[in-house]
Amino acid sequence: MTPCFTVQGFAVDLIRHLWDEGLYRDNKWLQKVHATWFNHWVEYKTCLTMDDVNRQIEEMFEESKVMPPIYWEEEKGETPLGGPIGYTYDFVDPASGPADSVQGPEQRKADGK
């Protein structure tokens, strides 16, 4: 159970679920419990929501597992500055298939081609 759990808040949540299903809507006891403990339910739901928000914030700051971009160039080429230069990013997981989405000599060397 979360530290947010209260019997009163949970009871009102259960009553609201029953009412959403169309059950016991005219029950006077449930209506009185709901009216009396409604503030506990608001605190209960707020706490659960904030726990979820805090979890999502912590996930935002986890270390990224993104591979760095690939840079390649040919030092000798058709122009005085050399050959082609490339800067690309490989979005294909190398373990998922044989397709090589990068067409540079450095990538070919890394692949052993």
Image (cartoon, grey):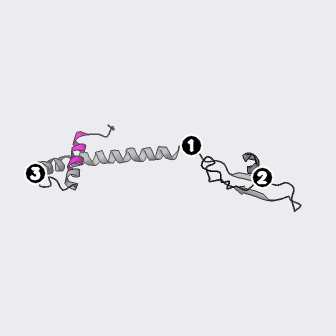
Instruction: Tell me what residue is drawn at x 16 percent, y 53 percent.
Output: 23
**Along the horizontal axis of the image, is 20 left or right of 91?**
left
Q: Where is mark 2, residue-wise?
A: 105
Residue 17 spot, x, y in % from top left: 23, 51
Q: Separation of disc 3 and disc 2 at Cα?
A: 78 Å
Is residue 14 shown in magenta?
A: yes
Asked if marks 1 and 3 touch (Cβ < 8 Å), the reply is no
Judged from this view, the residue extending furthest toward the front is 98
Amino acid tagged 2 = Pro
Q: Residues within 10 Å of mark 3 (few under 14, many from 20)?
A: few
In terms of image quadrants, where is residue 1? top left
Q: Nearer the viewer, residue 40 or 79?
A: 79
Percent of width and height locating residue 27: 11, 52
Q: CA distance from mark 1 to mark 2?
A: 30 Å
Question: Which disc number belongs to residue 95?
Answer: none
Front in this rendered view, residue 101 or 63:
101
Q: Residues within 10 Å of mark 1 (few under 14, many from 20)?
A: few
Q: Which residue is mark 1?
A: 63
**Image side of residue 61 versus residue 55, left or right:** right
Q: Secondary structure at mark 3?
A: helix
Query: Which numbered disc, 1 or 2, marks the residue that appears first in the sequence?
Result: 1
Give whichever of discs 1 and 3 has the lower sequence position: 3
Helix, strand or loop status at disc 1: loop
Task: State how far apart marks 1 and 3 are (Cα).
Answer: 53 Å
Read off the magenta span. 1-15
- Could you tell me which residue is drawn at 20 percent across and 51 percent down? 18
Q: Quickly name the residue at label 3.
A: 28
Q: Which of pointers 3 and 2 indicates the residue nearer the eye? A: 2
Per the image, is 53 magenta?
A: no
Amino acid type of the residue that numbered disc 1 sits on in the rendered structure: Glu
